[in-house]
Image (tube, rainbow, N blue to C red):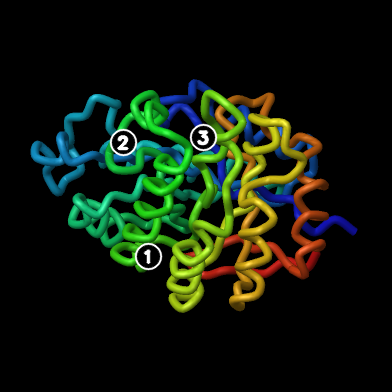
Amino acid sequence: MDNILFDNHIHTNYSFDSKEKPETYVLKAIENSYQEITFTNHNDLYPANFKTAKLDWQTEYDVPAYTMEDYQNEAEEIHMLNEKYKGKLVIKHGIELGLNVECMDYFETIAKESKYDFILGSIHNPWNMQVDDIYQHDPFTVHNMYFTTMRDSVKAMIKEVDVLSHFDFILRYGPTDEYKTLDFPKFKDIIAETLEITIQNGKGLELNTKLITSTDKNYPHPIPQIMALYKDLGGEILTYGSDSHRIDQFADSNRKLTIDYAKSHGFTSLCTYKDHQPIHHKL
């Protein structure tokens, strides 16, 4: 029996980079016999814009902000959808925070003032650089920037999140295969340090299928070496996320592949979250 009928990472029109309406996902989830989905829209903030930020989340960015008003509107819409489709699907309210140590007060405020079920923590712009600028550097420098930023962010902010999303996000993109391939031995120590902090704080990693749909890889984030290290260090919490920004990316065949990937590394469950607490579902 398939117990993994959920998706913990979905973007809607409350994210700056998606136009999909929440109910579109709800209908497809029901059609595919899903039990639960979690909307996790982007909230990224960078220091140049943080100077203008107020603690009511009203901010000015280069990228459109996810404000307190957005949070309230989304919460109301999710409540409405849960009432409308009661008994058919559980819809949870999460968020994907773009971690940045220079904006800690802002993120701490979000965590305290909101009533999210689930918070993903991500690195999208290491060293506060835009993606196009990052890839002006050589592959080693790019990977070093990314995993250094990840470690420093986890040290400072791990208590504000539940799960680290697409842990090796930097391998998804890049102008050549060298950027998409990690020289793992060179980064093993810094990755191990990051994972140890994550595990010690009772947090988890996400199996994110965007690596499959965006590259020629036949496995999700994180790569096998990181999965093996996470397991060896005592990691137990894994979640599943399609990272869908469009409806055609949701409820695809990669879910089965991802379950098999988790099993191949010795994991026996995947988790959903309620009130920031993991609920294990046996594989």
Q: Which residue is mark 2?
A: 66
Q: Are marks 3 and 2 in contact (CB under 8 Å)?
A: no
Q: Which residue is mark 1?
A: 158
Work out whether mark 2 precedes mark 1 in sequence or the reverse, and give the earlier one. Answer: 2
Q: Is residue 245 above or below residue 162?
A: above
What kind of residue is marked 3? Answer: His
Residue at label 3?
11
The three-letter code of the residue at mark 1 reads Ile
Looking at the image, tell me whether mark 3 or mark 1 is earlier in sequence order: 3
Residue found 85% across the figure and 55% down from its top: 2
How many marks overall? Answer: 3
From the viewer's perspective, is the residue at label 2 or at label 1 nearer? 1
**Three-letter code, disc 2:** Tyr
Q: Nearer the viewer, residue 265 or 38?
A: 265
How far is the residue under mark 3 from the one under mark 1?
22 Å
Mark 1 falls on what kind of element?
Answer: helix
The percent position of residue 38, horizontal first and vertical second, equals 56, 47
Q: Please name the residue shown 66% across and 58% down the image.
A: 225
Quarter holding the N terminus is: bottom right
Label 3 element class: loop
x and y percentages locating residue 116 in the rendered image: 41, 55
Q: Label 3: few (<14), some or many (≥20) within 10 Å?
A: many
